[in-house]
Amino acid sequence: MAKQISHVKATGTVCGDINFYKDVDWGFLVRMLPGVDSRRFWKDPAFEGSRRSAERFAIGNIMSSIIYRFVPLKRRYPRLFTQVRRIAIAFLKQGSEKRDVFSALFTFLTEQKRISLTREQFELLLSSFEEELKGRIQEQKPEKEKKMKNKLDIQVSAPLSEEDIEYFKLYMDDIAWTIKFEGEFPEDYRIPLFMLKHAV
């Protein structure tokens, strides 16, 4: 992390991964955002375990949502769905069959007196649950185009130099930015006209 030492300080993100921010202890800093690009995540053998974990999470989430809709609204509480999903993921991690996972979720919700299905109704619906799960897993999701985050909030604490003004004119077109003048400025200081539309 680099420290911002100029009289022009910024918070925000540009070029997708260059992050300007303010830390309580260290002041204004700049860093590269952490993370792995999605292509590498899905192709690199180093992320095989993470991909399996993500797949379990996705399947567990779908399975939980399928059975959770049979929990009446009045019997739900804020963390119930999270508990159901955790159970599903734990069973999937053990290598349990999908049918057994649905059965474990039904048993948990029955013991909690939350689900509106009887055992017979559950058994009748089980094959349709599995079909719905299969269909939802196979749904092709459109690949999201990663949008570049180009937004900065700028604070100026001293008069801008000609070089600063020239930089703003030439290099800030692709960035959504706001500027705030805070600090001691001479009475005759004039904010450049093109900056007025960005001033807050």
Image: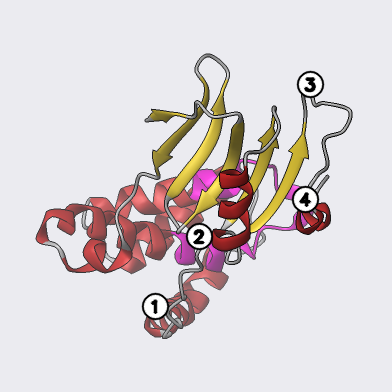
Residue 76 is one of the magenta-drawn residues = yes
Viewer-side label of 4, 2: 4
User: In terms of sequence position, does the residue under pointer 2 or pointer 3 come before the other?
Assistant: 2
| Three-letter residue code for mark 1 | Ile
**Highlighted range, magenta:** 61-84
Q: Is residue 186 magenta?
A: no
Task: Sort mark 2 into few (<14), some (14-19) or many (20+) by Cα contacts within 10 Å.
Answer: many
> Is residue 52 positioned above or below 86 on the image?
below
User: Residue visible at 37% across and 59% down?
Assistant: 101
Give the spatial CA distance, label 4 vs label 3.
17 Å
- Residue highlighted by disc 2: 64
Residue kind at label 2, given as amino acid type: Ser
Kindly report which numbered mark, 1 or 4, lies closer to the viewer in this rendering. 4
Q: CA distance from mark 1 to mark 3?
A: 60 Å
- How many numbered marks appear? 4
Kind of element beneath mark 4: loop
Report the disc number at residue 184: 3
Residue lying at the far top of the rendered structure:
25
- Of labels 1 and 2, the one closer to you: 1
Residue beneath label 1, please?
A: 137
Q: Is residue 19 left or right of residue 154?
A: left
**Residue on which the image places disc 4:** 192
- How far apart are the alpha carbons under marks 2 and 3? 59 Å
Relative depth, front residue between 5 and 139: 5
User: Label 3 sits on what residue type?
Assistant: Glu
User: For the point 33% across and 47% down, which residue is it?
Assistant: 90
Tell me the element at label 1: helix
